[in-house]
Image (tube, coloured by chain):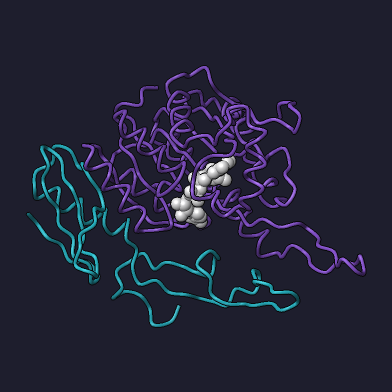
Chain colours: A cyan, B purple
Amino acid sequence: MPTLTYNDMTFAVEPRGDRWDISYALPNGANAIAGAGLLAGLPEGEATVRALALIKTVFPVGIRCVGPDVSHPNTIGDLKIIGPDVTHPNFIYWDKDSVSCPKEL
Amino acid sequence: MKINGSVALVTGGGNGIGEAVVKHLARQGAKVAVVDMVQKNIDRVVKDIKEAGGEALGIQANVTSEADTARYIKGTIEAFGQLNIAVSCAGIIRDGMMLSLDKETGKVSKKLGLDKWQAVIDTNLTGTFLCMRDAAEAMVNGGWEGLLVPISSVNKIGQVGQINYSSAKVADALMPKIIVGEFLMRGIRNIRCVAVAPGYTATPMLTGMNQDALKAILEDVHLGRLVAPEEIASLIGYCVENEAINATTIEITGGLCYPKGIAK
Ligand SMILES: NC(=O)c1ccc[n+]([C@@H]2O[C@H](COP(=O)([O-])OP(=O)(O)OC[C@H]3O[C@@H](n4cnc5c(N)ncnc54)[C@H](O)[C@@H]3O)[C@@H](O)[C@H]2O)c1
């Protein structure tokens, strides 16, 4: 069963019939399923390569917050609170390997 | 279009109606991408589908982000090789009256904040637009047959306390007419668009509502109970398989009436 380490996360690619399940370890030691019944008919080598590509798409890493976002203040009465917020466009994902993330965006 | 063998993505698939839709489609043999903002809910739904012998991929994403939209579409196609069904279920409520008055002076004491307006428009309207647009792009470029499903609401007719939500949902309900009209102009014949407008449905979203108001509303529902998320899911499944249903918005409310019995 191939295991992959990608940015501090450990993934396992496990066969199920002619398909593959991808699971990953949670910080509390439990396991979660990232994908089930994928990559039908692929041999282990190819499934592992395709699984890693998929993991990189699905789990973007190195989340960086660029702000403040002055166009979307949260308001309490007249008070405008300008800050990072995951629902706003100032919250961006760095979708490449964290090593290539520039020190300043 | 057959559900069996098709590929579906459902935003908001980690909970409520979206969860019921992904599970229904997976049970019928679709490969499903569960897109949501909450990773632990995604993990739960993907695990359930795996245990039922289905095929599923979880993708954490914020539907208001254009980059995330591109990423969840790409992930779905990388995993399953195509895309046929896109259901935009991710939605939020941030209810409030546009103006509140001071009881003594009769003057405005509070206005609905732009934060409440913007959050609902961003999620319920922009999120749906991005999902429909990028799913359609993938279907056209891939040459795949498809169905686009924006989720509207019966409150598209205009609900007090929901100027943000009703504005977004009436716009979502218009999408099928516009999208299918444009497809016809462009010669795109193999992709349909059908919006679904649920009435009051038994999901965690309703726990955020005023429970007394909800009880009063149920008195005006002919069915006498909340609609079940699985009932919405089975309607969407039916829409996938019946290709004559197109360019329209279907209400599923259990018979919601105005007080004293005129159906809404
Ligand atoms: N429940 C009802 O009575 C009812 C009635 C009419 C219409 N609707 C509509 O149906 C849809 C689903 O509602 P529900 O009751 O299942 O709600 P819900 O709260 O149970 O589920 C909504 C899901 O969307 C996700 N979500 C919210 N914002 C997101 C974002 N920015 N990016 C990604 N995911 C996000 C949430 O994490 C959640 O899993 C919504 O569009 C809602 O407006 C619901």
| Total numbered labels placed on residues in the image | 0
Where is residue A52? Give x, y as percent: 21, 57
Query: Which is nearer the eye, B98 or B55?
Result: B98
Tell me: residue B201, above or below residue A105: above
Where is residue A77? Give x, y as percent: 74, 74
Tell me: residue B72, above or below residue A4: above
**B218 displayed left or right of B258:** left
Question: Which residue is outermost to the bottom?
Answer: A103
Where on the picture, by quarter, is residue A94? Answer: bottom left
Query: Which is nearer the eye, B174 or A74?
Result: A74
What quarter of the picture does the C terminus of chain B occupy? top right
Where is residue A93? Give x, y as percent: 42, 66
Query: Which is nearer the eye, B58 or B211?
Result: B211
Tell me: residue B257, above or below residue B138: above
| Residue at 35% in and 37% down | B23
Query: Which is nearer the eye, B241 or B233?
Result: B233
What quarter of the picture does the N terminus of chain B occupy? top left
Is residue B69 visible to us here?
no
| Residue at 63% in and 53% down | B210
Where is residue B252? Give x, y as percent: 57, 29
| Residue at 73% in and 26% down | B261
| Residue at 73% in and 51% down | B163
